[in-house]
Amino acid sequence: MSAIEVQLLHPDARVPGRGRDGDAAYDLACVEPVTLAPGERALVPTGVAVAIPPGMCGLVLPRSGLAIKHGISCVNAPGLIDPNYRGELKVILINHGAEPWSAEPGDRIAQLLLVAFAAPALTVVDALTDSDRGAGGFGSSGR
């Protein structure tokens, strides 16, 4: 795969990076200070725009360390970035913890995972083809 174009839109913006070689996702950092009270949510700017290639999308995911240590997550996890979007990446964070949480510019707040997707045409039918599972869901496979 060729390189992904990244545009820095803010003086404090950081190029998304992976913590280690082989990591799947790129860390996203905030460019403004943010404080979230318990139960509060906010739209947090990253100062970054990306050109995701056709046939791929970006999924914005919570950081596990923030989740376990502070109860911080993404409200709409995963957030979806379509390949034709060229605006600033922003993350909707929520504090599920019991204490206020703060981040400063440059702090990592979420992760961006690039994923290939298929978008075939849809066909309306009178009935779907059978499967061994059928319509069973929500616990239908047992405990």
Image (cartoon, helix red, strand yellow):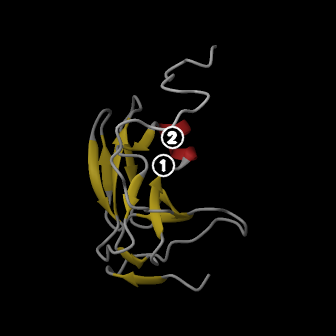
Q: Does dot 1 land on a helix, a strand or a loop?
A: loop
Q: Look at mark 2 in the image and give the residue it sits on.
A: 67
Reply above or below: 107 against 21: above
Q: Position of residue 124 (x, y in %)?
A: 33, 47
Reply above or below: 41 against 87: above
Q: Position of residue 9 (x, y in %)?
A: 32, 81
Task: Say few, some or many: other residues with alpha carbon within 10 Å of mark 1 (under 14 / 14 to 19 / 20 or more).
Answer: many
Query: Which label is found at residue 62?
Result: 1
The residue most toward the top is 143
- Name the residue type under label 2: Ala
Cβ atoms under marks 1 and 2 closer than 8 Å: yes
Placement of the C terminus among the 4 image quadrants: top right
- Which residue is more in the foreground, 141 or 11? 141
Reply above or below: 4 against 16: below
Compute the Cα span from label 1 to label 2. 7 Å
Image point 48% across, 49% down: which residue?
62
**Numbered disc in front, either 1 or 2:** 1
Q: Where is residue 56 in the image (x, y as percent from the top left)?
A: 49, 69
Image point 36% across, 76% down: which residue?
49
Q: Does dot 2 land on a helix, a strand or a loop?
A: helix
Q: Can residue 58 be seen in this view?
A: yes
Task: Say few, some or many: other residues with alpha carbon within 10 Å of mark 2 (under 14 / 14 to 19 / 20 or more).
Answer: some
